[in-house]
Each structure stands twice: as structure tokens, then as C-alpha cells.
């Protein structure tokens, strides 16, 4: 989700998108287990 949000911001320059990116980044720092689960889900999607 971070990569998507950053890509949208870099293409649009939207301040709101940047603030969303920073909020998501902060949440990931507070809960690193969530990021690991998200990465694992992307690596091995459940069909």
C-alpha cells in the first residue's frame, strides 16, 4: 500500500496523498507485524 500511495503522490503531487502516505508509514512503524503479513500475502496470495 505504501508503494501505491507514494507512486500516486509522485505522479500527482497531491498533498493529501502525501499526508496519507506519511500516516500509513507511521502505522507500519508502530506495527511492523502488519507489514510482514502484507508482504507475505503478496508473495503467496490465497486463491
Image: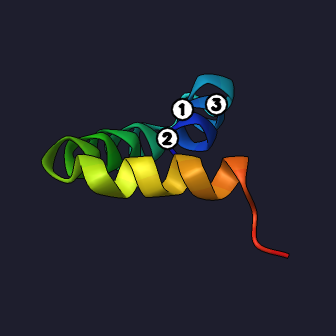
Residue 14, x across and y down, in percent: 51, 37
Residue 18, x across and y down, in percent: 40, 37
Residue highlighted by disc 2: 2
Up-down relation of residue 45 to residue 47 (above or below): above
- Residue at 75 percent across and 63 percent down: it is 45
Whole-angstrom CA distance, mark 3 to mark 2, is 9 Å
Q: Nearer the viewer, residue 33 or 16?
A: 33
Which element type, helix, strand or loop, lies under badge 1?
helix
Up-down relation of residue 17 to residue 9 (above or below): below
Q: Viewed as shown, does residue 14 lie left or right of 46? A: left
- Asked if disc 3 and disc 1 are in contact, CB closer than 8 Å, the reply is yes
Disc number for residue 6? 1
Q: Viewed as shown, does residue 9 lie left or right of 18? A: right
- Residue at 49 percent across and 41 percent down: it is 2
Disc number for residue 26? none
- Residue at 33 percent across and 49 percent down: it is 24
Up-down relation of residue 28 to residue 7 (above or below): below
Q: Viewed as shown, does residue 27 lie left or right of 47? A: left
Going from N to C along the chain, the mark reached first, 3 or 2, is: 2
Which element type, helix, strand or loop, lies under badge 3?
helix
Residue 19, x across and y down, in percent: 32, 43
Residue highlighted by disc 3: 7
The quadrant where residue 8 appears:
top right
Whole-angstrom CA distance, mark 2 to mark 1, is 6 Å
Circle 1 residues within 10 Å: few <14, some 14–19, many ≥20: some
Whole-angstrom CA distance, mark 3 to mark 1, is 4 Å
Amino acid at each position: 500500500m505504501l508503494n501505491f500511495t507514494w507512486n500516486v503522490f509522485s505522479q500527482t503531487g497531491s498533498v493529501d496523498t502525501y499526508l496519507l502516505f506519511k500516516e500509513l508509514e507511521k502505522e507500519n512503524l508502530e506495527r511492523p507485524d502488519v507489514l510482514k503479513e502484507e508482504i507475505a500475502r503478496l508473495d503467496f496470495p490465497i486463491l
